[in-house]
Structure formats: C-alpha cells, structure tokens
Image: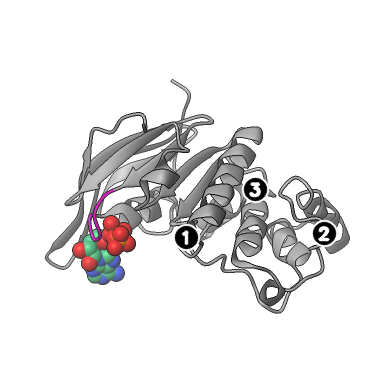
Amino acid sequence: MNDVLVGRALTKRFGQTVALGGVDIAIRAGEAVAIMGPSGSGKSTLLHCLAGIMKPDAGEVHLLGQRIDAMGERKRSALRRTRFGFVFQFGQLLPELPAEENVALPLMLGGVARAQAVRQAREWFAPLGLQSMESRRPGELSGGQAQRVAIARALVSKPAVVFADEPTGALDQRTGQDTMRLLVEATRHNDASLIVVTHDPNVAAWCDRTVEVRDGQLLAGGVPA
Ligand SMILES: Nc1ncnc2c1ncn2[C@@H]1O[C@H](COP(=O)(O)OP(=O)(O)OP(=O)(O)O)[C@@H](O)[C@H]1O
C-alpha cells in the first residue's frame, strides 16, 4: 500500500561478479530510506537499477504501479527527467551556467520556456538559504552551497522520488549534516520519497529507515538510532 517505487528480485551481474543477487525493496510515499553497506556490496547498482539508469539482468522495477525497467531508453529517460530527481556526491552542476539556470535545466529539458523556468528556479533559493546566489557560477559557490543548488535542481520538477548517492561525501561533517537536514526537509515538504546511498551513520540517521546491502543481498534494516 502506498508504495511509490518497488524493486522485485533485482539481479545484476558484471562478468563473474554478482552485484545484486535478487533484491526486493519497496519505498513508500514520502519516506526517506538510507541504503548502507560495505564498499562494493551493491548499493550504487541497486540505486541505478531503481532509478532506471541501469537495466537489471532480471527482476522488475515499478514506479507508481507502472513497470519501468522494460521500457525503451527514450521513455525511461523522459521518466527519469520528470519523476525522479538526483543529487550526486559532487553536485555535478554545469560550470558555465549560473546557479539559477542549473536549477532551471530540468524544467527547460521538459519544455518549459527559459524565462518561466528561471522564475520557478529562483523560488528555491531562499528556502535553501541561497539568497543572492542566483547568478553565481558553481565555481563561485562553496561545496555546501553547490550541494544546495543540486538539491534545488533535484526537486524543481516536483519528482516522486529523489535519489542521492553519497550527497554529503565531499563535505565536512558540519556542512554535511546541514545539507542532509535540508535535503530531508525539502523532499518531505515536496511529498517526495528519498533514497540515499551513504557510508555515514550520521547521514542515515536523518532517514526514516535504513536498509543494508551485503554481497548483493538486502539485510533487514531498522529505524536509525
Ligand atoms: N560497470 C561495472 N563493471 C564491472 N563491475 C562492476 C561495475 N559496476 C559495479 N561493479 C561491481 O559490482 C559490485 C557492486 O558495486 P557497487 O558500485 O554497486 O557497490 P557499492 O556498494 O556502491 O560500492 P561503494 O560503496 O564502494 O561505492 C562490486 O564488486 C563492483 O566492483
């Protein structure tokens, strides 16, 4: 009930390596889930399969009841653009564009006219503590500010699910905690679900629950301490 994103029996191999060995996972509407586990355990592979970036060898991914893993690449990429948002370890902002255009980009790619898209993008700056940063280029922002611009970009299309892969990995402890709090609050405020891959228990602690991946298998997770 109320599952937004469901992965069933997800399996992915790279040569002899079984990166995912039949994983079942269900993400409910509005919840924040941390995916933890040792290096090489399959966390990123799981995230990429759920996000439609990677096709699993077997298994299924359903978004709001619609099977997405079997779609063609064009349809899947349109869906990624409109229904999913992404925050990566290093913001991955386009260095030549001002912050507001970086945020506006998903809207423009979806066909919104530039002026309108930038207007909508600007609305995100104050709530994320980015007042007067609109016209700065990514190189003129601190790591924490750049990550907040990336959060705005992930949410601007009102996605159903935001995926974050080590979103605080490049930040110091304090900035990382502030950034994670903003990420969780902003996704919650927008009724989006959040899936965060992290090594850091302090990051996972912001989420509603944690699941652990070991050797391509999902271990039962709990509510973070
Ligand atoms: N493109 C690829 N080609 C070959 N092997 C891969 C590829 N991507 C991942 N793997 C392997 O699959 C396994 C799972 O990798 P994955 O990146 O999902 O782990 P992870 O838990 O995210 O690790 P980390 O925390 O170090 O990022 C690893 O053994 C990895 O070496």
> For mark 2, what is the residue?
118
- Over which residues does the magenta segment extend? 37-41
> For mark 3, what is the residue?
155
- The number of callouts visible is 3
Would residue 211 appear left or right of 190 to someone viewing this image?
left
Task: Name which residue lies at 51% across and 29% down.
Answer: 29
Check the image and report above or below for 177 versus 95.
above
Check the image and report above or below for 160 versus 200.
above
Q: What secondary structure predominates along the stretch shown in magenta?
A: loop
- Please name whichever residue, 98 or 202, is drawn nearer the observer in this view of the structure: 202
What crowding class fits label 3: few (fewer than 14 Cα within 10 Å), some (14-19), or many (20 or more)? many
- Please name whichever residue, 104 or 125, is drawn nearer the observer in this view of the structure: 125
Amino acid at dot 1? Glu
- Residue at the extreme top: 1
**Quadrant location of the C terminus?**
top left
Residue 197 screen position, x and y as percent:
39, 51
Q: Dividing the image into four quarters, tell me where ligand 1 lies.
A: bottom left
SS for tag 3?
helix
**Quadrant location of the N terminus?**
top left
Check the image and report above or below for 67 versus 122.
above
SS for tag 2?
helix
Residue 173 screen position, x and y as percent:
48, 55
| 3D distance between C-alphas at marks 3 and 1 | 22 Å
Q: Give residue 73's mark.
A: 1
